[in-house]
Amino acid sequence: MVIHIVEPGDTVYALAVRYGVPMSRILEDNGLTPGETLVVGQALAVRVPSLTHTVRSGDTLWALSRRYGVPLRQLWRNNIALEGGDLLFPGQSLVIRYRGQEGRTPLSVLGYAYPWIGRDRLRTLAPFLTLAAPFTHRVTAEGGLEPLDDAPLLPLIRGGGAAPLLHLANLTDEGFSGGLVHPLLNSEALQAGLLDRIDAELDRKEYRGVDVDFEGVLPEDAAALPRFLRRLRARLAPRGLPLLAAVPPKVSGGQAGALVGGYDYPLLGEAADGLLLMTYEWGYAAGPPMAVAPLDQVRRVAQYAASVIPREKLWLGVPAYGYDWPLPFVAGETRARSLSPAEAVALAREHGAEISFDGTAQSPWFRYRDGEGWQHEVWFEDVRSIAAKLDLVEEFSFTGVGVWEIGRSFPQLWTVLDARREIRDPV
């Protein structure tokens, strides 16, 4: 895969000629529409097919999978325009293999999805996932488990070859609450009730594991959280189901603070089968403009986690979004709006902005002036920033990445994931 940075005068047609690939491949891999003007500084992923097949009458995707010895999920990933379906037509060109797909290092991919995710989007992305976690089953202080209407999502997840996880969160209408789970984490009786309810939900919907996302856990519960996870893992192990847990980013064992004080990395690493490092939100809605996941900060978290937790248990969190801040930034007053990477590029195009790239943060950004004269600063993710994070995952030999969240338009994410790594199937 080549990463091309758009220069003045570049067009998709010219790039297709330059790299010897069909225009349709550049459009699909980058989520572009025909005739769309490229933005100076925009990064594009360019993949070159090594083997293609022209569909003939009677061809089916399953038959082509057997004929060429390429897994069905890989054919879907190679041809995202199929949207995870099997509708073929004579004359259609399918990519069987891309250059560089041999010898890729395996990677597990976990995607989080709100229940209202577009069904076509989920069907398209499921082949790129090892695990998928519909968000979320809320827990209560009394050990209750609120239902989640994710029944329409589960067949799409399984149909794409991914495995669904039961996702638990201490989420209230006001946000995540450590106080909400404080009684639960300190009562074996309340935990027993919750574990029974989890068992019943696993039976009812046939989830393939559990993902615990307790955020803002109180510092006094730093030992109670791993005790709860050990009890839950003991329930899951006989079923052959894994337990994952999300943790905030820490850079040392002695790091204090309301957001991180309740998390003991070594104890949590021992208690769960895997830990997702939530390595994002340095740039956030109420904070000053900056990268959502600056690589220098992400690296510090990865280094500490790898020093106290077996690396095969670690997953790196990857954001699929950015923020648009109005300027000047005023602490306590300014609020950024969240947007997808595709929306960020569209915004730069609309306002004639040139996209820059911060070498330290390894993230793209730009400024523009809106119709009322206000200046804005936008930070987002692109193929370069994701490639840098995947390089970090490989450097530290982490087992996978967790994408928050997959409902936003970010075709380049899936392009670079598939180009750089061999996406694992569920066990």
Image: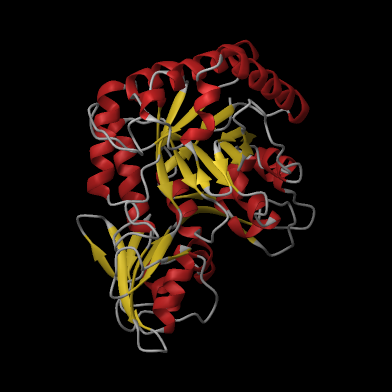
Where does residue 424 sit, x and y in percent of width and height? 52, 33
Left or right: where does residue 315 sit relative to residue 123?
left
* In the foreground, 309 or 409: 309
Q: Residue at x 36, y 31 (%)?
A: 398
Left or right: where does residue 147 sit relative to residue 273?
right
Q: Residue at x 56, y 41 (%)?
A: 171
Q: Quadrant of the N terminus?
A: bottom left
Q: Residue at x 67, y 54 (%)?
A: 116
Which residue ends up furthest to the right in the rendered image?
Answer: 58
Residue 31 appears in the figure: yes
Residue 425, by quadrant, is top right
Which residue ends up furthest to the left in the rendered image?
Answer: 360
Q: Tell me, what colour scheme is on the image?
A: secondary structure
Residue 369, by quadrant, is bottom left
Where does residue 280 sit, x and y in percent of width and height? 37, 48
* In the foreground, 365 or 382: 365
